[in-house]
């Protein structure tokens, strides 16, 4: 499966776009259609009974977050996820989005109560 283990990663936009193109190309192959057939992405997902990869990864990330939040505080997964490495800079000029930042975006996108 293409999204195996992706719940633990924070992607850059360029990498996300490549994954979405891959997913849609695979769906087109499954349906036996060509790019020239002009099927919209939403119709393509509906015909295959699939959802966009971005939404599937977001659901998996939120599921993983719930799993980690229920762990005891001394578990390594929870320490690594919410800890701050000693070598990390306090403020960077253009910091990359981390996993926690991506989760906050996901929660805002789903408009869940208690959004961070």
Image: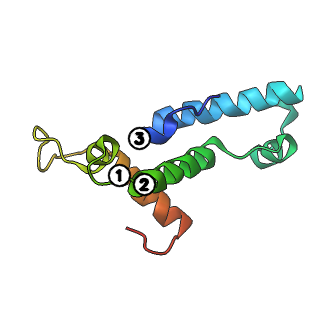
| In front of the other: 45 or 77 | 77
**Residue 89 in the figure: left or right of residue 11:** left
Q: Position of residue 64 (x, y in %)?
A: 48, 48
**Which quadrant is the N terminus positioned in?**
top right
Q: CA distance from mark 2 to mark 3?
A: 9 Å
Mark number displayed over residue 40? none
Local crowd at mark 1 within 10 Å, few (<14), some, or many (≥20)?
Answer: some
Q: CA distance from mark 1 to mark 2?
A: 5 Å
Q: CA distance from mark 3 to mark 1?
A: 9 Å
Q: Quadrant of residue 104?
A: bottom left
Identify the element where label 1 is drawn: helix
| In front of the other: 74 or 43 | 74
Residue 11 visible to the viewer: no
**Contact (CB < 8 A) between labels 1 and 2?**
yes
Identify the element where label 2 is drawn: helix
Which residue does the image show at 49% across and 41% down from the upper left? 7
* Residue carrying label 3: 10
* Residue carrying label 1: 100
Which residue does the image show at 40% across and 57% down from the upper left? 69
Q: Quadrant of residue 88?
A: top left
* Residue carrying label 2: 103
Local crowd at mark 3 within 10 Å, few (<14), some, or many (≥20)?
Answer: some
Label whose residue precedes the other's in the sequence (2 or 3): 3
Check the image and report above or below for 114 versus 73.
below
Identify the element where label 3 is drawn: loop
């Amino acid at each position: 499966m293409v999204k195996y283990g992706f719940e633990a990663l924070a992607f850059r936009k360029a990498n996300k776009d490549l994954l979405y193109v891959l997913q849609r190309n695979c769906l087109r192959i499954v349906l036996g259609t060509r790019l020239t057939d002009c099927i919209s992405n939403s119709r393509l997902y509906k015909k295959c009974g699939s959802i966009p990869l971005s939404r599937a990864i977001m659901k998996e990330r939120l599921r993983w977050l719930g799993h980690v939040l229920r762990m005891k505080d001394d578990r390594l997964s929870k320490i690594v996820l919410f800890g701050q490495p000693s070598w990390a800079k306090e403020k960077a000029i253009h910091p990359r989005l981390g996993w926690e930042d991506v989760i906050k975006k996901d929660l805002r996108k789903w408009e869940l109560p208690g959004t961070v």
